[in-house]
Amino acid sequence: MFDPKDGPPPQEEAPYSGEEGRSEPLGGRARRRIRQHPLFQLTLARMREFWREPEAVFWVFIFPVLLALALGIAFRNQPPDKIAVGVDRRIPDASRIVELLSGLPDLEPVLLSGEALSREMSKGRIDLNLGPCDPPSGDTPLPESGSEVTGTDTFCYTYDPARPGGRLARLVVDEALQKALGRKDVIRAREKKVTETGARYIDFLIPGLIGLNLMASGMWGVGFNVVDSRTKKLLKLLTATPMRRSHFLLGLMLSRLLFLVLEVVALVGFGRAVFGVVVHGSLVSLAVILLVGAMTFAGLGLLVAARPKSIEAVSGWMNFVMLPMWLLSGSFFSYARFPEVMHPFIRALPLTALNDAVRSVMNEGAPLPESLTELGVLLVWGGLSFVVALKIFRWQ
């Protein structure tokens, strides 16, 4: 009951009005509520923290572009290197062999002694060595063009079968010598040379760099901030506020998603402008895959940072988790080079799934349903990581 001694009765708060005295429109109230929501403010705070760190901006936006530029130039499309062929002076008609091979644009023959040839092959400067056979089978000179071949070896091809260049040199040189000495081809064939845009190394590299950048920025961006806040006792202070703990963790992940657009646009735009990289598939499909990938690595970063109490500890765990994916997931070269027995394990890694899905859309123009397996792998990793992180998260 109102008592006059207590002063005038309390007045109800008047509705917000603008300059003309009108009440605030419904859309304005909704925007104000969003701006005042804890999740919005936490996300905004994380984004501001990021922009205030020049080192973070460099590693997230500038370093991947510089890496793409360096690797794109190093592995650009160019005429194939000439095959270095060493000819031993001791074999019969060595000078004539050099003369025959010199007329071919793909070969670079050089006349050397036996010891010099061995040194050059050990250093990888020569792909193939034409030398005398051991044990020798006789000093048989090269036959004249069109004459019959005898059963005696003229020389021996020496090469390393483990090196693709050595096997290729063996085939090319033998083909050149046989044709120069009169061998006739039974089948005639024509060549048709094409250059496919999506088959270049830079087309393979850009999706891999996108995956690597999402992994690094997601895990380091979330994990480092969490542990840094824990060491500064900020997490302990935040738990004393009305803030929901889930809002704090979701704010970290959402801030990474907002930077996703800038990261992808920077890399894809650079690849398009400098190297002519084209996205052959749907941009919507690509956006869905990248969104799921970013959420996955944000969840992994949250899981790795759930318990460590120091920057040194979380750095070690981050490297432990990311290093296998750096090496195995096919960012810089195809994981098909690893033994086939390892392929199921490699495909189960989240970065492998992200790289495969991004390449299928960018390079092959595949629709989103063809990447459902990869999306499933990402969703399982991200969902489990976030749930486990919430269970074991250390706030102090």
Image: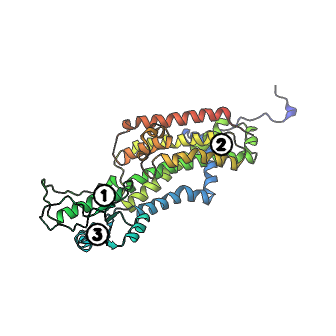
The residue labelled by disc 2 is: 305
The residue labelled by disc 3 is: 91
- Indicate which disc, 3 or 2, sits on the residue closer to the N terminus: 3
Per the model, the C-alpha gap separating discs 3 and 2 is: 67 Å
Per the model, the C-alpha gap separating discs 1 and 3 is: 22 Å
- Indicate which disc, 1 or 3, sits on the residue closer to the N terminus: 3
Horizontally, residue 193 falls left or right of residue 228, namely left
> The disc labelled 2 sits on which kind of residue?
Ala
Q: Residue at x 38, y 38 (%)?
A: 368
Q: Secondary structure at mark 3?
A: loop
Q: Secondary structure at mark 1?
A: helix
Q: Are marks 1 and 3 in contact (CB under 8 Å)?
A: no
Q: Quadrant of the C terminus?
A: top right
Colouring? rainbow
> The disc labelled 3 sits on which kind of residue?
Ile
Residue 294's tag is none
> The disc labelled 1 sits on which kind of residue?
Leu
Q: Give the crowd class for mark 3: few <14, some 14-19, many >=20 residues within 10 Å.
A: many
- Whether residue 37 appears in this view of the structure is no
Q: Residue at x 34, y 42 (%)?
A: 366
Q: How many marks?
A: 3
The residue labelled by disc 1 is: 168
